[in-house]
Amino acid sequence: MTDKLTLEIITPEGFTFTEEVDELTAPGTMGEFGVLPGHAPFMTTLETGAITYKTGNTSKQVVVKAAYAQVIDDHVLVLADSAELKQ
Amino acid sequence: MPNLRDIRTRITSVTNTGKITKAMQMVSAAKLRRAQNAMLATRPYAIKLFEMLSYLASAVERESYPLLNLRQRRLVELIVLTSDKGLCGAFNTNVLKETARLINELKAEGIAVSIVAVGKKARDYFHRVGIPIRKTFVDFYKHVKFEDAQAIAGEIIESYTNESVDELIIVYNEYKTVLQQTPKRARLLPVETQASGYTGDGILDKFIFEPSEAEILNALLPKYVENQIFRAVLESRVSEEAARMVAMENANKNTKDLMGKLTLQYNKARQAAITIELMDIVGGAEALAND
């Protein structure tokens, strides 16, 4: 369990998304940042854009709008105005 | 005594009313369920947002944030949430009465009041009693979106930060059960946070903030207000449908009672007419027999 991240995305209109991922990158206001397991507690605002996450060899994207991200104990929580899975 | 045809017309009319109220009751029941789901869906976001906010609010000096700061109340703004449509019992009356009470309380303290009306019923009411409305929002209840709440919030936060408004109270119908909705007032601004509880465990010192606590908090606070308004609107929506469902159920019961009474009246009148006719015939026959 310790080498996985939990990515959780929530919007006010009830979209929720939770997945175990290996690593992710997100569009922070101060520049894009990556999160790997064991990341320090971290809180930031996000630009509108895509969060890319990798599980094994597959990589997927979620587009978020006006979001905030918080990382605590390998749990990445993203609060967004709206979010959508990119196919 | 009303004649037969009059009664029959009334029975038809009452039957039709009954059909309408029955249909409206069922529509409301369906809408109620949908509105309830929408309301529940906002909960995880609200909880997490409040958590984040409380972390942050305990890390900063409250005084430097206008949205957290209590200031002297000179002008209080009220957001009043009503429905666009009627036929929902005392739903709107309750909220408007509560608002009138609140306005009187504030005026007694010498505080000026400004009104933001949400829903046609609030708009019409304030027009009627001659209280000026600063801003009106109508016609979005059918499908409430987060953007609608943001539109309301944006307007209000602006007047709050430029200090033309000192406090913001929202008045709406709180949903308790299907049978019970009570008017509620809640302070939106300045924001109340649970500042305590997070300070002791030292987790904040370990946090890395980007750009800075201050900037994140500045961005999060309006979000929080938007979300509070969004939830209140959804809750008011649930209450409205619940109130309408109950009102229509009662109306439906009343039409049934009335139908019973009218049918009885109709049968009596019919019987009376038959009796009179029989008596005429018997009388006529007797007159003939006596000849």
Image (cartoon, coloured by chain):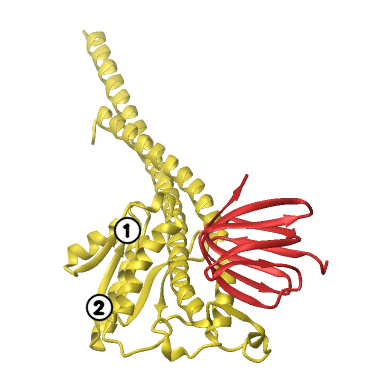
- Residue B111 drawn at (x, y percent): 25, 85
Q: Name the amino acid, label 1.
A: Gly
For image coordinates 27% across by 61% down, the residue present is B136
Residue B112: image location, x then y, percent: 23, 82
Q: Which chain is red?
A: A
Q: Quadrant of the N terminus of chain B?
A: top left
Quick check: can you spot residue B215?
A: yes
Give the Cα distance between marks 2 and 1: 19 Å
Q: Is residue B98 visible?
A: no
- Front-most of residues B227 and B158: B158
Residue B113: assigned label: 2
Answer above or below: position of B208 versus B255.
below
Chain displayed in yellow: B
B145 displayed left or right of B103:
right
Say which residue label 1 marks: B119
Q: Residue at x 33, y 36 (%)?
A: B265
Q: Quadrant of residue A75?
A: bottom right
Q: Which quadrant: the C terminus of chain B?
A: top left
SS for callout 2: strand
Note whether B135 is above or below B30 in the view shown: below
Say whether residue B230 is left or right of residue B36.
Answer: left
